[in-house]
Image (cartoon, rainbow, N blue to C red):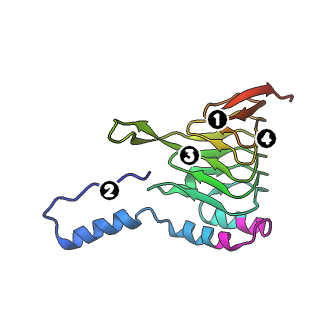
Amino acid sequence: MPPVSPALPERVPPLRRVLHLLRAEYGALNLRWLVASGIARLLPRMAFVRTRTALYRLGGVRIGRGTSFYGPATIWAGLCRFPERLTIGTNCRINSPLYAELDAPISIGDSVAIGWDVRLITSNHALGGAENRAGPNLASPVSIGDGCWIGAGATLLPGVTIGRGSIVAAGSVVAGSCGPGTLLAGNPARPIRKLGA
């Protein structure tokens, strides 16, 4: 949840009040990203993969050579200049829809395969009192190592690091990090076995 703008004191000139309101409503807009992602969203899935990827680069996402987006991605992050918080390595294959929430950075290594409908979540809430259990926003980065395969419908929660060459099985919800060469599965995901080199 994006941070709330502080309230203005009661006696503030009308022009300053209007500017404050505009900043609160539109301050998070990144026009470069809006235009690039808007055009990318119009392209048919599984077609124009290089064009879509080039548009995301133009929008500010750091994407390595040979990486392809096979459909639109939803990339969002509260009130920050967010595209720079997403780093994607070389030769990755990213299916759609991908949801990347960037309250904290997300790093995707080289040669990573991401399945359909994967969610990368970086924010959570502190536990609040009974009157409001969703307390203040907390954010932690997500990192996916080189050579990983993230199965369709998987969710990676805040603070998770997936070690190099690991697999997250389809539909898994990953709340804890794993070392390299691990097969994770389940909800919550647990290590099933070590994978060969």
Give the SS element for disc 4. Answer: loop
**Disc 1 residue type?**
Thr
- Counting from the top left corner in percent of width and height, residue 16 is at 23, 69
- Find residue 161 and name its label: 1
Q: CA distance from mark 4 to mark 3?
A: 19 Å
Which of the two discs, 4 and 2, labels the residue nearer the N terminus?
A: 2
Q: Which residue is mark 3?
A: 105
Give the SS element for disc 1. Answer: strand
- Counting from the top left corner in percent of width and height, residue 18 is at 27, 71
- Find residue 5 and name its label: 2
Q: Quadrant of residue 185?
A: top right
Within 10 angstroms of label 2, few (less than 14), some, or many (20 or more) residues?
Answer: few
Q: CA distance from mark 1 to mark 2?
A: 32 Å
Q: CA distance from mark 4 to mark 2?
A: 41 Å
Q: Which residues are magenta?
A: 39-52
User: Magenta span has 30?
Assistant: no
**Disc 4 residue type?**
Gly
Q: Nearer the viewer, residue 118 or 159?
A: 118
Q: Eyeballing the image, is 12 above or below 110?
A: below
Q: Decide if residue 2 is on the left or right side of residue 41.
A: left
User: Magenta span has 50?
Assistant: yes
- Counting from the top left corner in percent of width and height, residue 131 is at 32, 40
- Counting from the top left corner in percent of width and height, residue 22 is at 34, 69
Q: Mark 1 near mark 4, Cβ–Cβ under 8 Å? A: no
- Callout count: 4
Task: Kindly identify the residue that appears in the image at 24 percent across and 57 percent down.
Answer: 7
**Disc 2 residue type?**
Ser
Which of the two discs, 1 and 2, labels the residue nearer the N terminus?
A: 2
Q: Which residue is mark 4?
A: 147
Task: Kindly identify the residue that appears in the image at 75 percent across and 50 percent down.
Answer: 115
